[in-house]
Image (tube, helix red, strand yellow):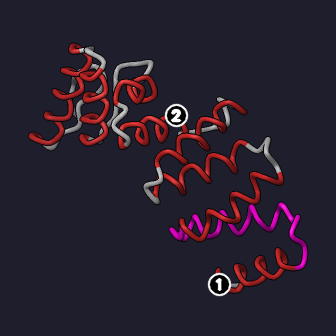
Amino acid sequence: MTPEELKARLRARIRRKHFDLAAHEELGRLLFGQGRFSEAVNPLKRACELAPESCQNHVLLGKCFYELQKFDEAVVSLCYARYLDREQSGDAKQFIGLSLQQLGRHSEAASYLILDEPPIADDPIELFNIGKAHFEESRLIEAEQCFERASALTSTGTTPTARGATT
């Protein structure tokens, strides 16, 4: 069955049985996986209404809002997911931080973007964002470490490790 046929079948199930949680979840995940975020919002919202305790539905809805640049709504969904289950909420913390940053709320974003350990990310943009959050919080040493690591990644093309060696 093609994704389009599956999508049509799920929509038909939803029309017949509006309270079919599994159909809403599956359709939302399918559309999200295809990058069709605006179409995924309604089935995921309905899935969250039908199963408000489902952390994963709230995370996926929050990520849709993030991709649609609806950062206020993303923060609400993702924070609720973390409230439900911090262990199962996956990367919700990072998406909350990034959403808050996009809203210009840098000091709030810092607490979500700051890692418990020194940053070992290999993405210079991610390191820059973490460094910026540290800077906004006046944590200049941590900011400098992030900026130096990001600079090293972009200028040398090598990947520094957590202990300073390069690979």
Q: Residue furthest left?
A: 155
> Mark 1 is on which residue type?
Glu
Residue 4 disc label: 1
Give residue 143's quadrant in the image.
top left
Give residue 148's quadrant in the image.
top left
Q: Residue at x 76, y 78 (%)?
A: 11
Position of 107 with respect to 50 (left or right) is left
Q: Residue at x 41, y 18 (%)?
A: 117
Residue 151 location (% of width, % of height): 14, 34
Read off the magenta span: 16-36
**Does residue 29 belong to the magenta stretch?**
yes
The residue where tag 2 is placed is: 93
Q: Residue at x 24, y 40 (%)?
A: 124
Q: Residue at x 53, y 39 (%)?
A: 91
Q: Nearer the viewer, mark 2 or mark 1?
A: 2
Does 97 sit above or below residue 119? below
Position of 157 with respect to 53 (left or right) is left
Residue 154 disc label: none
Q: Quadrant of the N terminus?
A: bottom right
